[in-house]
Image: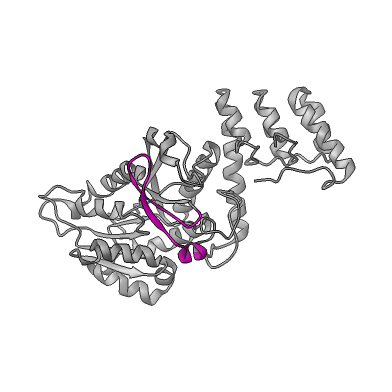
Amino acid sequence: MADVAMEGTVPTELTVLAHRLLIAAQSASAGEIQQLVDAGAPAWYQDEPLGWSCLHYAAERREPSILEMLLQGGAIWNALDKWGRTAGEICLSLGDQEGWQIIRNEGIRSEMLHHALAGPSSPQSDSSTNIKLRAEDKTSAGDNLTFLKSQLTWDIGEDGKERVLDADGNGVMMGWEEPLMSEHVRLMTSDHPNAQPGAEGMTIMNVGFGLGIVDRLFQTALSPSHPRPANHTIIEAHPQVLQYIRDKGVDKLPGVRILEGRWQDYLLDPEKIGEILECTPGGMGYDAIFVDTFAEGYEDLKAFFEVLPDILEPEHGIFSFWNGLGATNATIYAVSSSLAELHLEDVGLDTTWHDVLIPESLREQVWKGVRRRYWELPGYRLPIAKMKLM
């Protein structure tokens, strides 16, 4: 998110140009707007007190050429106003699909360029995507290492569903997600040859246990005539969650193996990968891999993508992840999903998206007592990715 520009933080002559551009974006001709851009007017500037940029104002005009002009002139596609809206949400509210697509496409182009210039991703570095999914901080919601040291609380929310909160009152995992997790598991297991009656059972890896919803579903998703997982590997790092796993007896279930630590501790080490894959047929990889971590950024997810060719069974293997990327903003969510699809394609996976309605996530009682909402959208984009056929 671009910071709201304050008087005195921008040279006076640029401030004057910025205000002129803000006014021009509302009603001036394309020629006048282009003249201001050519004169060096900062298109990234946001006004007070609304936090609107020239792109926000231009979005109200429903003139796609003006949006393109401002984006080429340096307007920031994902600048947020005081209500957390990008110019893309202004387009959506007016039914301007063409304008929204221009802003979305610029977001995809910008993010892909950022990652191309950054080079291979490394979750050990401090680099982060241009997409600001949350404010940068060192709280347990913003930093994975801080989260792993934080104190967690399990309780029942006002919606009657179990949830896990961190020490700051942020939702780590909440029971309303179960219908979405159920759909993930159904799509990952129902047609797999190793999940059919008489088969040996699937090999499954889940990264991030949370409430154990997805792991319980993997264990029980299939009918009694279908085989249970032949191997079910869970990678989890938080000490309290590990104790929760032991208390629930999950570690005692047939075929379940708990790897205590961060996924990076295991999957970025070639020797450990070899040992982990010994439980899969021929050591060729897992039939199904699911990822749902907390307080990790997109760079971490992208780094996981890059490991997939080494750990996913190449012929029938299925990968999916909890897609909460920027899920409080429709435009950022769309760009983030497209970015993930392109990065999965880079490592050899094709992605199919399944749209799922989640009206329950909009109910106020879900978020009562929760400090940070991580979902405010009526729909969920569920990814199912498989290795490309050669």
Write the residue at 57% across / 38% down: 104
Q: Give coordinates of residue 123: x percent, y percent.
A: 52, 64
Task: Indicate the quadrant containing the C terminus: top left, top right, bottom left or bottom right.
Answer: bottom left
Is 79 within the magenta? no
Relative to 59, residue 155 above or below: below
Viewer can see residue 327: yes
Residue 262 found in image quarter: bottom left
Q: Quadrant of residue 115?
A: bottom right
At horizontal 55% and vertical 37% (from top left) the residue drawn is 331
Q: Residue furthest bottom?
A: 271
- Please tell me whether residue 162 belongs to the stretch shown in magenta: yes
> Which residue lies most toward the right here?
13
Q: How is the image coloured?
A: one colour
Q: Is residue 69 visible?
A: no
Relative depth, front residue between 337 and 180: 180
Where is residue 279? Give x, y as percent.
24, 69
Residue 340, percent across and down?
48, 49
Count the numbered circles shown: 0
Figure quadrant of residue 229: bottom left
Q: Is residue 220 left or right of residue 388?
A: left
- Name above or below for residue 383 compared with residue 330: below
**In the displayed structure image, the side of residue 172 where residue 5 appears, left or right:** right
Q: Nearer the viewer, residue 11 or 200?
A: 11
Q: Residue at x 75, y 36 (%)?
A: 47
In the image, 131: left or right of 200? right
Task: Please report the bounds of the magenta region as a residue range.
Answer: 145-168
Q: Position of residue 182 (x, y in %)?
A: 28, 45
